[in-house]
Image: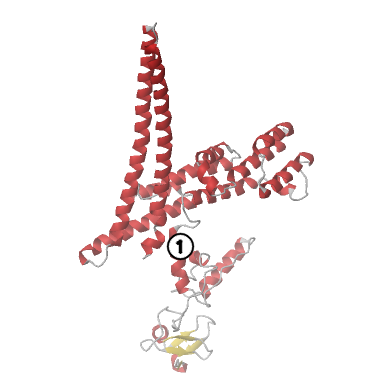
Amino acid sequence: MDVKSLEHPTLKVPYEILNKKFRTSQKIIDREVNHVSTALTDLEKLYTLESADKSAILQQLDKVQEMLVQLKEKGGEGVGGVVETGRVCKRRLDHLKEGCQEGEEDNEIQHKQWRKLRLDRFLVEHFLRSGFYDTAIKLSQQSGLQDLTDIEVFLAAKEVEEALSKGESNKCLLWCHDNKSKLRKLKSSLEFNVRLQEFIESVKAGKRADAVKYARKHLNTDEPEHLELVKQVMCLLAFPLDTQLEPYKQLLDANRWKQLIQLFRSENYKLHQLSNQSVLSVCLQAGLASLKTHYCIEPSHSDVTSHIQDMKRLRTINEERNIECPVCYPPLNNLAHGLPYSHCSQSRLVCYMSGTPLNEHNVPLMLPNGFVYGEQALLKMAEENDGQVTCPRTKQIYQFTQLEKVYVM
């Protein structure tokens, strides 16, 4: 069932958030309870003194009261967040259960509504991954999907990505600190690479002494894959900033911030058990793979093409492609690149002019130039042109009586 194969992140993401909030609130409550216990112990000691100072006891009682109020506030806030996330998990679970109900005719309308809601969820996620945050939020509010989408996760990631794009690393390091245990389990190198970039920026700014101090504090590592990179960046202290030698030229390149954004995005997906592709893209690729044949137009992947070349290619695709084939449709053509071809045991012939199947109701007819089209489209053309037909490929004109039937064995 597609619910089992596609909806894993729908429950996994809020579960991971619930787990994180529970552990965080537990640590806060344990810390506050420890403070209260310490204050009560001090109060008990004051009571046991022979010459107990009443004012000191009253001050200690006020301190205990203040700590209890603080415990109530922080504990309530933490527990409230856990309960809210648990409610989101239950809401999503109920949503998926509703989609798994099959076989009842009375629920057919509800199932259609559920599929529409599900499609909106996929669109919201795809918009968030593509950077259309306002569009995703509006669609989520319009469809009532606030509890069924992970907008908060992507908005939090957006702040970090925007900071990295400006050359600021503080938010990314704070995110790494908040998810330290998880990133350690994933063996993430994100924090190391961010620290490395901060060292490089210090070198660029001419603060070489500060860069050395920073390296001693944050780049002290024994891991072999990190140690080699540390050796390379330390050599930047001896090279000018306009060096053309590799790998030092690449280390000083400003595009490293873009690489950090891509690395952060990848680690964020891993942390929340999200795939690198949106569910909408996966569904589209599954459908395109079942339709893709060797005759479908292959996309062009040249990095540098002029606008005129792009327009010529688009015009060629529109002329050559089958109008009924989704794989040949330009917006989906690139998405189908690299997908396997579908296994087709029986071929289907389709008229190039009308896109309708060629069968006993639409007999294939061959023009004298060898091109074959459907009888229905050719008859319609002949009726409109006094018995003449024009080949759409070669623009040659023939009489309808010159056409011959084609028999497919």
Q: Residue at x 64, y 37 (%)?
A: 218
Residue type, numbered disc 1: Val
Q: Which residue is mark 1?
A: 282
Crowdedness of circle 1 by 10 Å Cα count: few (<14), some, many (20+)? Answer: some
Q: Position of residue 366 (x, y in %)?
A: 48, 90
The residue closer to the viewer here, 91 or 156, is: 91
| Residue 223 in the figure: left or right of residue 13 | right
> In percent of the image, x 53 and y 89: which residue is there?
370
**Would you say residue 172 is visible in this rendering?**
yes
Taking the view exactly as shown, the residue that stands out farthest to the left is: 106
* Residue depicted at x 47% and y 78%: 343
* Residue 301 versus residue 141 in the image, above or below: below
Give the color scheme: rainbow, by chain, secondary structure or one colour. secondary structure
Q: Visible in this render: residue 144? A: no
Q: Position of residue 118 (x, y in %)?
A: 35, 57
Image coordinates of residue 185 in percent, x first then y, are: 53, 48
Q: Is residue 100 above or below residue 348?
A: above
Closer-to-camera residue (285/231): 231
Q: In which quadrant of the rendered view does residue 3 lie?
A: bottom left
Q: Quadrant of the C terminus?
A: bottom left
Looking at the image, is 200 positioned above or below residue 333? above
Look at the numbered disc 1 and give the secondary structure of its residue: helix
